[in-house]
Structure formats: structure tokens, C-alpha cells
Image (spheres, coloured by chain):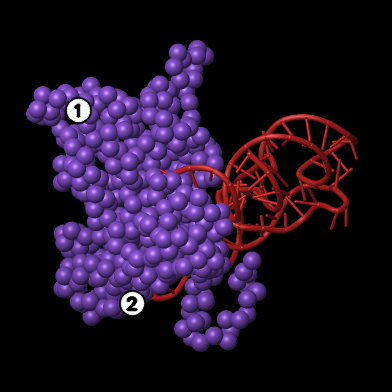
Amino acid sequence: MYNALQDRSWLDLTQEEHMAKEKEFVKEITPQSEDFSRWYIDTITKADLMDYSPVRGCIVFKPDGYELWEAITRELDRRFKETGHRNAYFPLFIPESFFEKEKEHVEGFNPELPWVTEVGGEKLEERLAIRPTSETIIGYMYSQWIQSYRDLPLLINQWANVVRWEKRTLPFLRTSEFLWQEGHTAHATAEEAEAETRQMLDVYTDFVENELSIPVIRGQKTPSEKFPGAVATFSIEAMMKDGKAIQAGTSHYLGDNFARSFEIKFLDRDNERKYVYTTSWGMSTRIIGALIMVHGDDRGLQLPPRIAPTQVIIIPIGPAKTRERVLLATDEVYAQLKAAGIRVRVDAREDLSPGWKFNEYEMRGIPLRLELGPRDLDANQAVLVRRDTGEKETVSLDDLAQRVPVLLSEIQQSMYDRALAFRVERSEPVSDIAQLHEVVRTKRGFALAGWCGDRACEAKIKEETGATSRNIPFDPPQTLSTCVSCGKAAAHTVWFARAY
RNA sequence: CGGAGUUUAGCGCAGUUUGGUAGCGCGCCUGCCUUGGGAGCAGGAGGUCACAGGUUCAAAUCCUGUAACUCCGACCA
């Protein structure tokens, strides 16, 4: 365990290194390089995003964490509505018989389902599952609602909590109860449903890359990794700073599987009764974990400006005798930024030193800090400090409303660029399992490999390296011709990685 | 679900070997003083030592069991 007080090595460091080292032991966050898991837990705890709950595997979203989710829902919801979807809400409880209608589906979820079996001490006639996802109950309702081709397409989204009793949980990334949205659509033709599946993957990609500054790999899941009951599952995959993958969002083409199970039929123009084709797609609070693990550093969180609940924190500085003057100017700067549409807050608490606040808001990931003190006022300027690079600049008070939005957008882009460069650097093609193992375990990254299409080869890779297939990318950097496992001709080029 | 570790004040920990008054740092409260990278001084509050049993004159400490958390595996959209 690193003990800051006993570590004298920093005495020999240069001024700059000395500063950095000093900062290191001021805060209570384990460095990423020392223990990434500890870093993650330290960061989300110290940044006050969540707390553990008395219920195993369930966390409390504290206001700062929930505010992040609210920002995410706002941006996603806007995109869903722009693409013609409407929100609805279906029950939390699902009758047991519903699950049994789709064999693959029930087998996929059975191990994680909690059941309500009695109420008021009396046993229920039929057990009720607490939903792990809502395909079945929505499928049933759709069978009631859809009569004619004129009822199609049916484009509905639900914001909800779902429960999957996970054996191993990790805050945000894998919790027994989590929040998400699930879209469920029904279409007259397979082509239209497939187009919807791709469109929603595009929506997710746009959201994650542009709002969260997280570059993603788009592709199709292999059969063993696809959603239970789906014809095809598509995903966007992101690389965390420890080189592991997180599935950031999924979109499923369900074909007519659920339509057949739930008798969802419509009368077409030709007066024939036909099954509909359905899709479902989801993104969950897991994305918050990804956001933290992609951008965070040893000083804590780092939030991309477009999603950050607070984009600029203003810290007024100065002793009592200049305080009134500084606060007056702070009010003006605040109003100016607010009017420019920037999410801005002021921390004028007198009992905490400016230095304390600098560290605190860096830990909390606020993208831009604005310092305003008496010396600044004399020069009619303010100091702006970027969270991502630490760069300082002074800006005339008259130019703030122009300069701040520009800086925020530069930060947004630069965070994306940095994450992309990191992923590219940690990704490489491999030609045998030993190499694949080397890439995912030692170098800690993504391995691009040829795959013959045989489940046994995929299972063997997982067995020997701990890596799972992430997806078959739409745009692989190159195409590989032999299977990394058996050496036969490759049917697909696949990304493999250790995953959360 | 297996293996290992942890559980003592809000947080981080010492105390457990060898049973005998509940401790430290940070934070918190009051006051003074301070403010450009986690300020200082003084005073103060705060704990069924995870939980349940057991041994003992006496248990944070020894024994048994349970739970939660962390890590590593297994499982898993």
C-alpha cells in the first residue's frame, strides 16, 4: 500500500514532478495504474455519484449520479422522438406463462429472474416475474393493439427499471436492479424492421460519440452472444482505460419470433393475415460506468461538456476586504454565461480555500473552471482552466460569453480524440490464440481475429484467454482470412476482448 | 456459486498475537483568524467494535454460525 507520508522519493523530483506528486497524495483516489477496480470504486464514491444499499447488488443513485442519468435520458429521449417514437409504460410484473411462450427467451433469463409468489400470505395462482426486459408483455399487448397494416409501424419506447439477479455486481456496470430504456417496434415487413434495428444503432452511436465523447465499434453479435429470442443482435462496443470492453448499447432484430409466440398478426393490403416483424433496443445506466471508465483519470471524473450537468464552475477568490467587489463581478459573469445557455454554478463558500475547491471540482469532473479574483478584476479578466488538459488561459470579461462555448466544444472534441487514439493504440490483429491472449491479458486491449463461425472455437478462445467475442464489426480495419482457433478459413473478422 | 481478504465514529485506519477504561488522522460542530492549488489555533460532539449464538468474573480481542463488501474464478444479453 502506498504511504504518502513515508514516501521521500519526491524530494528528488523536478519542480513540475513535485507538483504532480504532491497532488497525488492530496486526494484519496487509488491511481489507475495501481488498481483500476479500486480507482473506479474510489472515484464514484468520492465524487458522490452513488452509495451501496442494504439490498445486495443494488445501489442508490445519489443526486450527482442521478443528474448524469437525467442528462443522458434527456438527450436520448429527444433522439427517439425525432425518429418518430413515443413513450409508454408497461407493468413491472410479468405472468410466468408469458415467458414460456418463447423458449430461447425463457432459457436465457431464467437464472436471473426474481419471482413474486405470494401476496398477503396467500399464494398466487400464477407466479409473477419481476421484468428482466419487456418483450413478452409488450408482445402480448401488441397482439391486442395491432389489427391492420394501418396500425403499423408501431414505434414505442419505455423508460423503466428492470431486475436481473446478477451473481457478481459492480456499481453502474452490473447491478441487480437497473434503469434503462427499451424500445419495442412492430413492422409490416422484415426489411422495415431491419432498417429500424440499424437506425436505432445509428441513434445510439450518434448519442454516445457526440454527447459522451466515447468512440464505439459497431457490429453484429455472434450467435452465442446475441439476445435470447433474437434473429440478430447489433451492438456498439467501447474500450475502457483498462483495455476491457463495455457493450454500450444494443439493438435487436427479432424477426417474427415474438410475433409467432404472441400471435401478433395484421391484415395486410392484400387481405392476408400476416405476422409482424419486431425489434427491440436498449441502453442502460451501465453507460454511466462506461463514461467514467473511458474518461476518468487519477484526479477523478472527467465529464464531457455536452453531458456534464454543470459545465462551468465559478470560483470567486479573495480576502474579506475585496470580497464584496469580487462577488459582485461573479454575479455578472454568472448571468452572462447563463444567458449564453451555459450550465454554470458558483461556489462562493467562504469556509473552503480556493485550492480545496480546485481539487474538489476536478475530482467531480466539471469540464471548465473559472477563477475570478481581485487581480483579475484589476485587469478586467478571468482565468479559465480546462479539466481535460489542465491548461490555463486568461480571458477578458467582455469576451467570456464567446470564449467559453468555444472552449467547451474543444474539450468535447479533444476528449473524443484522446479516447479514440487510446483505443486504436490498444487494438491489434492477431493470428493465433497465444497472440490473442497476449493482446487481451498482457497488453490489455482488443484483438481482431478471424473466426470460422464455429461456436466451439469461440468457446475455446474464451476458455483459454478470458476474452469473449465483442462483435463482428461493420467496418473492420482489415479482414482476416483464417480462424484464430482452428486455422480453417475464417467466415468473419471479429473483435475479441475481456469485457465487463 | 467456489477461493481469498475485509468489516472498529461520516471516511481512512490502529488496537485482536498475550481477554481487563474505545483510540488516531481526516471530516463534522463552536469561536477566532484566513482565501490565486486541499490554511492555522483553541474548544467540542460523535462508536451496541457487521450481526447472532457460545466460552469467561470479564470479549473489539477466544470459539461457532450468518451477512455485506472487495479481489480472483465460474455463470451471464
Q: Residue at x 20, y 77 (%)?
A: A396
Label 1 sits on a secondary structure element that is: strand
Q: Which chain: purple? A: A
Disc 1 marks a residue whose amino acid type is Lys
State whether residue A225 is above or below residue A373: above
**Image disc number at residue A274:** 1
Q: Residue furthest front?
A: A488
| Residue A336: x %, y % from top left | 17, 63
Query: Which residue shows up at 57% across the image and 57% down it?
Result: A464
Q: Residue at x 51, y 87 (%)?
A: A14
- Name which of mark 2 and mark 1 comes first in the sequence: 1
Q: How many marks?
A: 2
Of the residues tagged 2 and 1, which is closer to the observer?
1
Observer-nearest of A174 and A205 = A205
Near-viewer residue (A423 or A224): A224
Disc 1: host chain:
A
Residue A335 in percent (x, y) is at: 19, 60
What is the letter of the red chain? B
Q: Are marks 2 and 1 on the same chain?
A: yes
Q: Quadrant of the N terminus of chain A?
A: bottom right
Q: Nearer the viewer, residue A449 or A24?
A: A449
Which quarter of the figure has residue A318? Answer: bottom left
